[in-house]
Image (cartoon, helix red, strand yellow):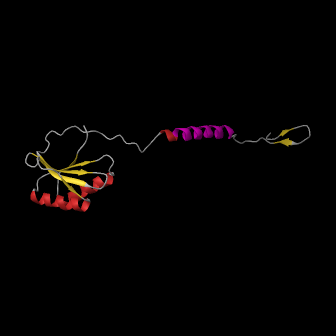
Amino acid sequence: MANTTMRGGRSRKFKSEINVVPYIDVMLVLLVIFMVAAPLTNPGVIDLPTAAKSNLPPTEYIQISLQPDTSATIGINGQNGGGAQPEKVGGRAALMQKLRAMHEKNGKLPVMISADKDIKYDEVIQVISEAKKIGIDRVGLATRQ
């Protein structure tokens, strides 16, 4: 008997449907939890590593210092050129001309770039890229210890 009879002679049919109200309640609670927890994580903060001294640092190298006001200084540090005062150059074009001249004079000198912490990362990468285009094989970054 699929249908059951009632007093009035009417038949009653069973309803077979799922009650979704508890599922909606759980989903709303999860939504609130994720909305509260999302601002607590900050994906923009990066903890940069520090570096120790290398085993065999170069005795002589070209030092490039980058400042946030788009000026730079360039000079040769080390045993022979360590006493010379670094030369202040204007923008990146003047820096690359001076670097090219130094590289032509001393072709095997590596380059050490020390950039201010407020400088844009892209500018440091551009200087590294242009130094590689000139033909400088060894380019390093100065770090805090």
Q: How many marks?
A: 0
Q: Where does residue 65 sit, x and y in percent of width and height?
A: 23, 50
- Position of 50 with respect to 24 (left or right) is left
Predominant SS of the magenta segment = helix
Q: Where does residue 114 sit, x and y in percent of width and height?
A: 24, 47
- Position of 70 with respect to 9 (left or right) is left
Closest to the observer, 4 or 97? 97
Farthest right residue? 8
- Position of 27 with respect to 119 (left or right) is right
Closest to the observer, 99 or 107? 99
Is residue 124 one of those drawn in magenta? no
Residue shown at the point (51%, 41%) measured from the top left: 39
Q: Where does residue 97 sit, x and y in percent of width and height?
A: 19, 62
Can residue 89 be seen in the rendering of this structure? Answer: yes
Residue shown at the point (28%, 53%) measured from the top left: 124
Q: Where does residue 119 sit, x and y in percent of width and height?
A: 32, 50
Closest to the observer, 63 or 89? 89
- Position of 82 with respect to 65 (left or right) is left
Can residue 133 be seen in the rendering of this structure? Answer: no
The region drawn magenta spans 20-37
Answer above or below: position of 120 versus 10.
below
Closest to the observer, 33 or 74? 74
The quadrant of the image that shows the N terminus is: top right
Picture quadrant where residue 137 is located: bottom left
